[in-house]
Amino acid sequence: MESLSPPGLSPQPLERVVLRAGELRSHERFGPDVVNRGALLYSCEWDSGVFESGVMWGGIFRSGRFLGGVFWGAWWLGGSFEGGLWHSGFGPDGLYRPRGESPR
Amino acid sequence: MTPLLTIFTASVREDLARLWLACVRRAFPRDETLVEIFDDSEAGRLRPERLEGATILRPGPGRRDFQEAYNDALGRAATPWLALLDTDTYAVSRDVWPRVRARFGPDVAAVLCAPRGATGGDDTVALVLNVAAYRAACEDAPDGFLPRVEGEVNGERPGQWRGHDTGDLLTRAVARRGGRIDVLPLGDEGAFVRFDALTNAQLLAAWSGDGPLLALAREHVYFREGCLGNIALRRLYARTFPDGPPFSFRVPTAAVWAAMASGGLGSLRDAASRARRMRAGARRIEKFLRA
């Protein structure tokens, strides 16, 4: 656990969980307090956090920001895809979206 | 002789495609078959000069990745039959083609040579299909071979969904139209040597590092198969293509076994058993290629 807020800018710094490169997380649910910076998420559920880098293999992206990393065979239900590689996955309608066809 | 069959595969990896093509070229008569390989590497890694005898297809509109490339292959096929054969499935018998061809008949829509088994459903690992029957069924399954999600699985573990795997919807549509899916388990009979998860294991190592891949391999048989299969084929590839380029799965053998050992005696025994099977498979491939 570490604080992502610069000291002195917030009266109550938001404590966030940061997932790091080299980590594997399986079948877990991640909420708004989580930032991924390189971990492999295997069949996990992502809800409201910030995905900066790493790999999302399978699982469900419910909401949040996808800024970088690899989205691979997972189900995209909502959120904003702002960067990274859409390797493959499914849109909110359940239909397959091929490589490069991330939801807008 | 007019070709009767197009053999299609998609591959991210040139090394696997070379081994696969060497087997296909020996197992199938050249005057009756065409071979196509879709380059799914994104970077144009599949070099035609190292894959002689096959047409290399690059990504483009309508075939942006391997899933779409199946539909594209069906739409383009100039032969009455189309074989989808994964690059982790190696034909090691000249009996494959005569055995499959003997099953062709007016009511046969496909010959399924490697049934999925425990997970049920249809499969595209080694599927020889009637082009006309599958094209007609696309009217009922307009997304063709594409997979689809149906809904969430509200179980104990988060992140799970249910759906249809590649080709399932289309093959079911074919069957509903009266097409017969003939099961010919040539894999079980030894005509194919099958591996699993070879490319996904390599991609995971490239994108996540060796550590997360090996942690997954400890927990999940699928990735264990991928790591051990790559080790078995790495030696075979080096012997078969000594001039390189090197095999793309770079995870050290010792690291894989250290990971298996850290999972306990049961994990180690399971891995040892799988590795023996895979080494035997690699030896069968080599024997076939050198015969």
Image (cartoon, coloured by chain):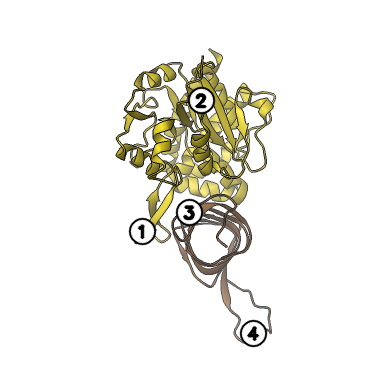
Chain colours: A brown, B yellow
Q: Are marks 1 and 2 in contact (CB under 8 Å)?
A: no
Mark-to-mark CA distance, 3 and 2: 30 Å
Q: Residues within 10 Å of mark 4 (few under 14, many from 20)?
A: few
> Residue B153, which numbered label?
1
Would you place residue B50 above or below residue A84 in this image?
Answer: above
- Please say if the residues under marks 1 and 4 sit with CB atoms less than 8 Å apart: no
Residue positioned 29% across, 35% down in the render: B178
Q: Mark 4 falls within which chain? A: A
The answer as to whether the residues below labels 2 and 4 share one chain is: no
Spatial CA span between label 1 and label 4: 40 Å
Q: Which mark is residue A10?
A: 4
Q: Which structural element holds mark 1? A: loop
* Circle 2 residue: B282
Residue located 68% across and 78% down the image: A6
Category of crowding for the residue at label 1, using alpha-carbon neighbours closer than 10 angstroms: few (below 14), some (14–19), many (at least 20): few
Give me the C-alpha separation between circle 2 and circle 4.
61 Å
The percent coordinates of residue B36 (x first, y second) are 56, 29
Can the viewer see residue A50 in this picture?
yes
Q: Chain of mark 1?
A: B
**Callout 2 amino acid:** Ala
Return the disc, 4 or 3, that comes first in the chain's sequence. 4
Picture coordinates of residue A23 (x, y %)? Answer: 56, 57
Crowd tier of the residue under label 3, counting other residues whose Cα lies within 10 Å: few below 14, some 14–19, many 20 or above: many
**Residue, disc 3:** A58
Amino acid type of the residue tagged 4 in the rendering: Ser
For the residues bearing labels 2 and 4, Cβ distance under 8 angstroms: no
